[in-house]
């Protein structure tokens, strides 16, 4: 049985202002979320970590297998009008946010489509809510604000004006990020970059504790 509500995804209209994006609350089905959260990778540091090399349980693995599958790829191809066949997939996870996270940015030009799936039961705080922006200079000039609530999907086509960010938040904030990227070379580079960044963060924490 699918963990994803692809019927609602397909029925949701693609927004094109100020860039192509889509928001689907409940994209991960309610009945699957508890098991996925129980099996979510254990990461105690802020930042993005490559999924490869992280331990996680079977329900989370089943979700990742479905996200990597042809049905999901074809659904996104149809929605965004893009051919993703043969494009590598990069997967990272976040478990925590720091005050420095969420600054306004577009994604790198090597990324084609960005998918964010949030896995946080409820969200009360004003910070940490992703905003899709009309410019790269004003966090308050947003077209939509998305709380990172359990099962919510936000996805967009990367472009030079696909600005996004969020107000500061410090604490647990679970997210799965999936990108179709241009090439295997890009995938190797980005994965290595994230791993080095994670290692440096761990080293800094060890130094502070010693």
Image (tube, rainbow, N blue to C red):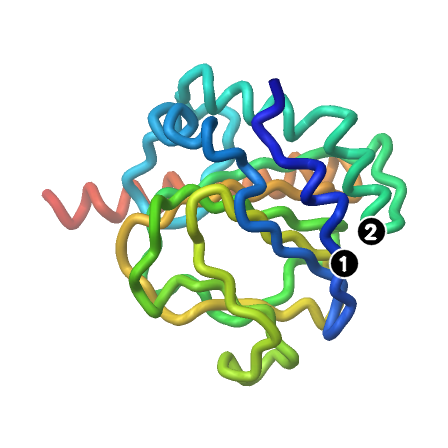
Q: Earlier in the sequence, mark 1 or mark 2?
A: 1
Left or right position of 146 against 120: right
Give the residue pinned by disc 2: 80
Taking 126 as reference, is 60 left or right?
right
Q: Quadrant of residue 187?
A: top right
Q: Tell me which corner region of the image, top left, top right, bottom left or bottom right, holds residue 55.
A: top left
Q: Which residue is mark 1?
A: 14
Residue at 41% across / 49% down in the picture? 47
Q: In the rendered image, which quarter contains the N terminus?
A: top right
Residue 41 position, x and y percent, is: 39, 29
In this orientation, which residue lies closer to the viewer: 39 or 31?
Answer: 31
Q: Give the numbered dot on residue 30.
A: none
User: Mark 1–mark 2 contact, CB under 8 Å?
Assistant: yes
Which residue is at 86% across, 43% downward? 78
Residue 111 position within the rendered picture, expressed as x and y whole percent measured from the top left: 72, 50
Query: What is the quadrant of residue 109 in the picture?
Result: bottom right
Q: In the structure shown, which secondary structural element does the residue marked by tag 2 occupy?
A: helix
Neighbours of disc 2 within 10 Å: few (<14), some (14-19), many (20+): some
Task: Mark 1: give few (<14), some (14-19) or many (20+) Cα within 10 Å.
Answer: some
Above or below, 33 relative to 22:
above
């Amino acid at each position: 049985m699918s963990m994803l509500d692809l019927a609602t995804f397909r029925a949701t209209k693609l927004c094109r202002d100020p860039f192509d994006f889509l928001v689907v609350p409940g994209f991960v089905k309610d009945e699957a979320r508890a098991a996925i959260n129980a099996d979510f990778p254990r990461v105690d540091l802020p930042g993005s970590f490559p999924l490869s090399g992280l331990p996680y349980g079977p329900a989370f693995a089943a979700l990742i297998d479905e996200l990597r599958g042809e049905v999901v790829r074809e659904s996104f191809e149809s929605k965004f009008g893009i051919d993703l066949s043969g494009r590598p997939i990069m997967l990272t996870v976040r478990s925590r946010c720091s005050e420095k996270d969420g600054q306004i940015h577009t994604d790198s030009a090597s990324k084609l489509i960005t998918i964010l799936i949030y896995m946080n039961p409820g969200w009360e705080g004003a910070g940490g809510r992703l905003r899709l922006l009309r410019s790269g200079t004003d966090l308050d000039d947003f077209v939509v604000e998305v709380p990172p609530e359990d099962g919510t999907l936000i996805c967009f086509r990367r472009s030079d004006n696909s600005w996004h960010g969020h107000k500061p938040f410090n604490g647990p904030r679970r997210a799965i990020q999936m990108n179709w990227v241009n090439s295997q070379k890009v995938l190797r580079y980005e994965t290595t970059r994230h791993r080095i960044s994670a290692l440096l963060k761990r080293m800094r924490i060890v130094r502070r504790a010693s």
